[in-house]
Amino acid sequence: MIPMSPDVQALVGDYAEGVDNRSLLYEKFSLPKVWGHDRKFDDAGRWSVLRIVARGEELLQQNAKDRERRASGRKVRPDNAKRMHQEAQVARKLAVVARPDRELVRVANENAQRLLDSLKRSHDGRVVTFEATLGGRLLVNMAGGVIENAGICLDRCFGLPFLPGSAVKGIARSQALWEVKNAPTADTPNLLTLAMAVFGYGKTDIAQNGDWAWAAGQKEAHDAAAFLGAAEFKGCACFLPAYPTTPPTLVVDMVNQHYPAYYRGIRKQAIDDENPIPNYFPAVEAGSAFGFVVLINRVPEGFTPQELLDAARGWIERAITQKGAGAKTAAGYGWFELGHPPPAVTPDGAVSTPTAATPATVPFSPADALIAKWGGKLHITTNFAVALPEIAALTDDSDLKRLFEAVIPENQRRHNRRKNPYWQSFISGRHGESGKKILARLGFQLT
């Protein structure tokens, strides 16, 4: 049973089977683990996740059949068999959920696209918009939901996933901080001042242990603040939420904790005789496109709107393609490819726009295939051993240049010092010869 008042229960049903908004269903009508049960219901969280994802109905029905099968076993105690039958009934009831209106999803996607177009027209010269397509699954607001470590950011009106503006600004600001930190000394003052103008700062940000002081030094941060003429400064860029511009698909994902007793401190050693406890959570499937918007609210002296827009857009693009957005980015989640998904051609010759449920077709040329494979993954040098020999095998120099510019981070291409650890790794080791051939063919010199 899901806790709710009698009038709400009469409106939406005992198990909220009349609710078609995934945000409302997940945040307000999740199945509790303890309330209303004789004993702790360990599958409550997982089943609540399954209600909002693709194929959730099918998976819940399978769970119900599994409970019934186990309850009919010869050696099952009567009390356990009764409990399993009850759980099977709950699973079947949870499997009955009002389906989202596909037309409403289409309208929401069109609204997002219309917003991008309207902003371009109404704020000409002060706004930049672009689309990017998920290359990996996306996890947003995992720690902020009702179910522990299984949250997701869903729009309250349409129930669709989106990236909050605060998240977009956060990842762009983090990218800017690292670029300021790693910039050549001669470039640091201008880059720091530009970043502080875009994102703003408070007194703590330029203090001894503040973010901008960490990136460039306390004196440099104070000099930039003096140039902007304020001890505290509101950022000139507004980062709007990134809404899906193609129909997204929600899927269930999991992480498996193999040593629960060890991690809880009960055991001193992690031994392979424990039962793993899977933790399930919702994710946005790869293939969905999102629209990003940056709006300039004012232009301080010494800057131009285009300069601020180009900087903000560049930091967002590099952040989402090189580091990713949301949770578990180190495990391959949350990375994007720039642009809208290309139209897919069906066997009958029809053209359709791929979505998360119908991913984009595999790129045609070898260079495109390598861009799809290594885009956003070569900011870490550990991938060089596999990637560089594949890249060096390209025979066309123009394709090689296009691939190089697409997969090698721009900040590393600008920081082409021989002592840079990135390039040292690029031309050394067992893949070093491949790295040297690539640079030689491109005429890319390390100084």
Image (cartoon, helix red, strand yellow):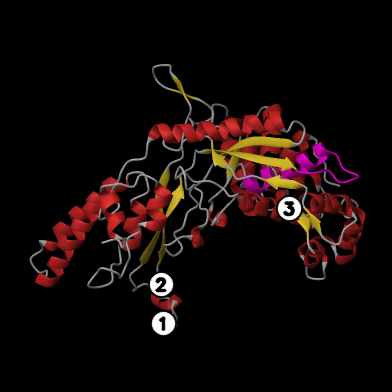
Residue 80 in percent (x, y) is at 15, 70
What's the residue type where badge 1 is placed?
Answer: Arg
Answer with left or right where residue 359 lies relative to residue 340: left
Range shown magenta: 297-322
Residue 165 in percent (x, y) is at 62, 49
Answer with left or right where residue 71 lies relative to residue 293: left
Residue 158 visible from this viewpoint: yes
Q: Nearer the viewer, mark 3 or mark 1?
A: 1
Report the front residue among 242 and 375: 242
Where does label 3 land, which residue?
422
- Placement of 211 over or under 341, stated as above or below: below
Q: Is residue 302 magenta?
A: yes
Where does label 1 land, which residue?
267
Q: Secondary structure at mark 1?
A: loop
What's the residue type where badge 3 is placed?
Answer: Tyr
Type of secondary structure dominating the magenta stretch: helix
Instruction: Identify the image quadrant of the N terminus.
Output: bottom left
Q: Residues within 10 Å of mark 2 (few under 14, many from 20)?
A: some
Report the front residue among 148 and 339: 148
What's the residue type where badge 2 is placed?
Answer: Tyr
